[in-house]
Image (cartoon, rainbow, N blue to C red):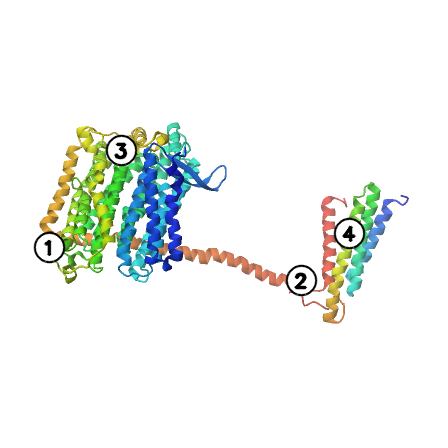
Amino acid sequence: MTAPLQYYLLLSAALFCVGLFGVLTRNNALIFLMSVELMLNAANVNFVAFSVYHGNLTGQLFALFVIALAAAEVAVGIGIFLVLYRNFGEVDVTVPTTMRW
Amino acid sequence: MAGEHIAFSFAPAIAALPLVAFVVALTFGRFMPKGGAFATILATGGSLLLSIWAAVAVAGGEVYHETLYVWSPAEALELHFGALIDPLSALMLVIVSLIAFLVQVFSLGYMNDEGETGLPRYYAGMGLFSFSMLAFVMADNVLMAFMFFELVGLCSWLLIGFWFREAGPASAAKKAFLVTRFGDYFFLVGVVGIFAAFGSGLFVGDEAFPVLAEEALANGESVLGFAPETGITILSLLVLGGVIGKSAQFPLHTWLPDAMEGPTPVSALIHAATMVAAGVYLVARIYGFYALSPTALAIVAFVGGFTALLAATMATVKQELKQVLAYSTISQYGYMMLALGAGGYVAATFHLMTHAFFKALLFLGAGSVIIAMHHNENMWDMGGLKERMPVTYWTFLAGSLALAGILPFAGFWSKDEVLYEALIHGVNTPLLLAAYAMGLLAVFFTGFYTFRMVFLTFHGDPRTDTAEDPEGVRWNVKFPLVVLGTLATVAGLINMAPVKKLLGPDIDYLHQWLNGPEEAAALTAHHYGDLLHDYAGYTAADLSPLLPAVVSLGIALAGVLLAYRLYAVPEPEQHTDRLGAIKTLWFNNYYQDEYQVWIAEGVAYPFAKAADTFDQGVVDGVVDGVSSVSLFSGSRIKRIQTGIVTNYAALLALGLIGLLLLLGVTGGWFA
C-alpha cells in the first residue's frame, strides 16, 4: 500500500460527484443509469480502501454485494427503459410524468 | 378423584347421546318415520338409563370428577370442560333425562298425531335442549356452566318460537331470550369476577372457588380489593342475576307466562326440568359460596318469598289453563329460592325434584286437555271433562294435589320442609320471617288457583260443544301421565323429614343422599350446614315440625275449600268482579310488563339514541375529521411530486446536504 487513504477518498468523492452531476443534469435514461453506476462505484472504492486500511475483508465483501446489486438494478432499469421506449418512443426521463398521481 | 366405577366411563355419553340425536334429527329427520322422534327418544332413554346407573354408582359412595377437554391450557388459568357427578348432579341428571324422555314420548301424541309440520326441527331442538341441560348439570366449573346456561337459553328461544310464522310465538321467544339474557349479563360479569378473584372456577376439590372463598374469609384476605365479606356478596349477587332471569324470579319473571306460546310439551320441559330449573340448580351447585354471605342469602330468600306470593296472586284470575300453570311455576320456583336463602339446601333440592314431577305432569295433562279441546285453552270453554277423559283427570288431580301441597302427595312434603326451614331459621332473622310469611300466604293462593283450575276444567257441566265431545288421546299421552302421576303421588315419601323428627325412624333419605360420599366433603349438605352456621350466622330454632305442617296444610285446604265453594258447581260463574280494583291489577300482572316496556321505551331507548347520536356525531365526527384533514393536506402536498426523476434526485441530494449541514452545525464541526 503506497498511496495514502486520503487519495482514495478524494477519488471516491470525485466519482460520486460526477455521478450525481449526471443524474441531476442529464435527461437520457441510459446516461442516468450509468451515473447511478458511477455513484455506486464511488461507494465501492470507499469500501475497498477502508478494507485495506483496516486490514479486514468485510469491506471487500460488501463491494462484491454492491456489484451484484448494481447488476440486478441495471437489469430492472433496462427492462423499465425498454417499456418506456415502447410507449413513448424515446428514453427521455422528463417525458413520462403521467405516473405521479 | 375420578370414580372407579364402570358406570362413570359412560358418564360423558349421558350428555352426548342427545347431542347425537340432535344432529341425526336435523340432518336425516325428514327421511325418518315420525320426523326423527325415535332418534331423540332413544337417545334420551339411553341418557336416562346411564344417569340411573351413574346414580347407583354414586350411591355406592363414589364421586366422579374428570376433566374431559382442556381448551385453554394456560398455566395460570386453565379453562376446560369437565364432568362432575356427585349426589346432587346425579339426582338432577335422573330428573332431567326422565322428564325429557317422557316429554318426548308425549310429543308423539301432541305434535305427530296432530299433524304438525317441521317435526325434524322440533325433535332436533328437543335433543339439543336435553343435551344443554344435561351438560349444564354435569359441569364441573362455572365457565362451562355459564356456556351451557346460555345454550339452554338459546334452545328455549328455538322451541318457544317453534311456530315462528305466527306473531305471538316469535315475539314470546324473543322476549324469553332477551329477558333471560339481561340476567345472564350479570352472571357473565360474575363469572369473570370469580376467575379474577380466585383464579379458579371449579366447583369441587381443593381448588374449588367456594373453598377458596371460605379460606379468604377465614384468613381475612381481600377479594377483588374489597373486604372478603363484601367481595363474596357482590360476586354471589352477580351470579344471582342469571339465576333470577332463568328461574323467572321477580322482576325478571315476565318472560315465562309469554313462553306459553310454545308447544305444550316444550312448556313442560322448560318448566319442569330444563330451563327454569337451571337457575335454582346453579345456586344449589355453588351453595358453598352463597352460604358464606348472609346478605346474599337474605336477598335470595326475600326475592323467593316475594315471587312466590306475587305469582300466586296473579295465577288466581287467569282464564287460560297454561297461564295458571305458568304463574304457578314462577311461584313454586320462588319457594325453592326461599328455601335456599333460608338455609334449606336439602329442602330446595327436594322441592326442585317433586316440582319437576308434578309440574311436568300438570303441563302434560294440560296438553292432553288441549288436544281434547282442539287447542282451545280457555278454561271457561271446558268443564265436565272428568268423565270423558278419566286418565287425564286422575293424573291431573294427583298433580294438583301435589301442587297445592295436600298430604300425602309429593308437594306437601317438599313445600312443608321449605316453609319449616324458613321458619326455624327465620325466628331470629326478621327478613327471613317476612319471606316465610309471604310463602305461607302464597300457600292459600296456591290451593285456590290450583283447584279453581281443576274444577273449571274437569267438573261441572260441559260449557261448549267441544267439551261435550272431546277428542280422545292415545297411549303416548297416557303413558307419561301415568308415570308422572305415580311419581307425583309417592315421590314425597323419600324425604319425610317431619316424620323422622316426630317418630324417629331414619326415613329422610334425601338428606342422607345429599350428605353424600366422603370424597367430596365440601359438597355435602352437612358441610353447607356448618358454613351457614359459621359464616352466615344461621341458627335453627328448636321447633316441632308438627304445628307448622298443620298450619300450612290448613291454609292450603282453606284455599282448596274456597275454590270448591266457588267453582265446584254445575254452572260456575266468574267471581273476579268481587275483587274490585285488585282484579284489574291482577289481570294486568301488576303492570310488570308495562313498566318494563316503559323502562325499555322511555329510558333505555332515548339513552341508546343519545349514545347513537354521540357515536355518529362525536366519535365518528372525529374519525371523519381526521380523514378529511388527511385527504385535504394530501391533495395539496402531492403537488410537489412532479413526476420528473431528476427533481426527485435533486431533492434527495439537497436533503442529504441539508442533513449533513444540520449534523455539522449541531455536532460542532464548524466551531
Tell me where residue B62 sits by quadrant.
top left
Badge 2 marks a residue whose secondary structure is helix
Q: Spatial distance from mark 3 to mark 4, Cα to Cα?
A: 88 Å
Q: Spatial distance from mark 3 to mark 2, Cα to Cα?
A: 88 Å
Q: Spatial distance from mark 1 to mark 2, Cα to Cα?
A: 98 Å
Instruction: Please give the residue where the numbered disc 3 appears in the rendered image.
Output: B511
Badge 3 marks a residue whose secondary structure is helix
Residue B497, placed above or below residue B128: above
Marks 3 and 2: which is nearer the front?
3
Return the x and y of residue B615 as percentages of the image width and height.
44, 56
Residue type at mark 1? Answer: Gly
Residue type at mark 4? Answer: Val
Instruction: Please give the residue where the numbered disc 2 appears in the rendered image.
Output: B640
**In the figure, is residue B440 to the left or right of B643?**
left
Say which quadrant the C terminus of chain B sits in. Answer: top right
Q: Which sits earlier in the primary sequence, circle 1 or circle 3?
A: 1
Chain assignment, label 2:
B
Chain assignment, label 1:
B
* Residue A66 circle label: 4
Return the x and y of residue B517 as percentages of the image width and height.
34, 31
Q: Spatial distance from mark 1 to mark 3, Cα to Cα?
A: 43 Å
* Residue B460 circle label: 1
